[in-house]
Amino acid sequence: MEGDFTKNYLNMDLLRFTTAGSVDDGKSTLIGRLMYDSKSIFEDQMEAIEESSKRRGDENLNLALLTDGLKAEREQGITIDVAYRYFATPRRKFIIADTPGHIQYTRNMVTGASTANLAIILVDARNGVIEQTCRHAFIASLLRIKHLVVCVNKMDLVDYAEEPFNKIQDEFGAFSSKLDITDVRYIPISALKGDNVVDKSNNMSWYNGATLLYTLENVQIASDRNFIDGRFGVQGVVRPQSDKYHDFRGYTGKVEGGIFRPGDEVMVLPSGLTSKVKALETFEGQLEEAFPPMSICMTLEDDIDVGRGDMICRPNNHPEVSQDLDLMVCWLNQDGLKPGGKYIIRHSSNEARCVIKGVRYKMDINTLHRLEDDKEIQLNDIGRIFIRTTKPMMVDPYKKNRNTGSVILIDEFTNETVAAGMVI
């Protein structure tokens, strides 16, 4: 019985989602409420939250303390770092990234959203759509998050009235129509009271939609991955050097796009050599097919030169191989972008050095206008740049494949990640 439960749990669908919103919009409280009402908080966690709530002098159980892990967060009542939380229901597993609302922590929002399938954007029912709402929606669009849930929070403070909800829906709808997001849903909630989070609210009879948990459990994400364009980034070469596996030569990595099967013709980039897939191996045995986001060991029919950083793809469907990249970047470092500056670039399993050749424009987050006169990119700015790398990179446009279309830039002296980039 226990074995069946473990097997079912491991095979359950996983949804990664991020929360975003301005300061005090209730992101941490919402996550705490979501986990509390779905009975996903352990007994020792509950005791710690109760004790912290009493020590702070809170009248009620402060569920925001569940995600505020840093001492400075608990003292100031704000989120500074990205807090990850895990929980599961009978239908699905979840990984939550609780991201900061302050402008100076926008880089942390990018970090939390980079792997998300869905973004929850909180809007205070009293304040409506503000600058940070637009900023976070734009970043979600930029990172190709295809599902957006706008939670209009603190409905209890506007007497659960329909008018503020409709106004926010109209305002956000007008802004999001300019973005590349096709699935936007609106839910009126009270994270503090629990209305429409896990259970249906009795205070808003005018709302006929689903609760937040139901939406998270049922949103379809399988089609979000690219199952057409075969991409396999080689992370390492396996040579056991044992008598039993004397001639074994396999290539480990992650399937980043498409479906691979034994017998498929493949090409290795950047060399351009071709072969056929001999077998797809895992610890559990051989597979009949492999698809994203599986990690596997691939063997080929021919003994050709393949190493870390290479890309295995289809002969007639392969990424662009280039040393000149056009990128949209979110700058993550206190030191601004330096035209002509040299950085380390990491893409999939590949690594090289690069130089910033120039800045095309900087984005005005609020108006979505391109600022071609102001090209000085500082911390939290988003802009379009072009770079040249020291060796060829195998890239797809980010809108085609998030895995093979994303890069990071690293300061070669401090080893700090300075930018997250998306291939145009």
Image (tube, helix red, strand yellow):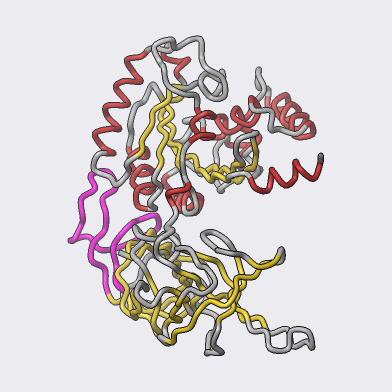
Query: Is 390 left, or right, of 84 in this rendering?
Result: left
Place residue 21 in its image quadrant. Answer: top left
Query: Is 346 left, or right, of 140 in this rendering?
Result: right
Residue 7, position as x, y percentages in the image: 72, 47
Vertical comparison of 301 with 202: above or below: below
Residue 220, position as x, y percentages in the image: 46, 40
Place residue 289 in its image quadrant. Answer: bottom right
Question: Total number of numbered labels?
Answer: 0
Which residue is rendered at x = 27% and y = 73% of the image?
358
Which residue is rendered at x = 44% and y = 87% of the image?
273
- Judged from this view, the residue extending furthest toward the left is 373
- The answer to which of 373 and 8 lies nearer the viewer is 8
- The answer to which of 7 and 333 lies nearer the viewer is 7
Residue 260, position as x, y percentages in the image: 50, 67
On the rendered image, what quadrant is the C terminus found in? bottom left
- The answer to which of 50 and 292 lies nearer the viewer is 292
| Magenta stretch encompasses residue 256 | no
Vertical comparison of 339 with 16: above or below: below
In the rendered structure, which segment of residues is drawn in magenta? Answer: 358-386
Vertical comparison of 194 with 265: above or below: above
| Magenta stretch encompasses residue 361 | yes
Query: Is 126 left, or right, of 192 in this rendering?
Result: left
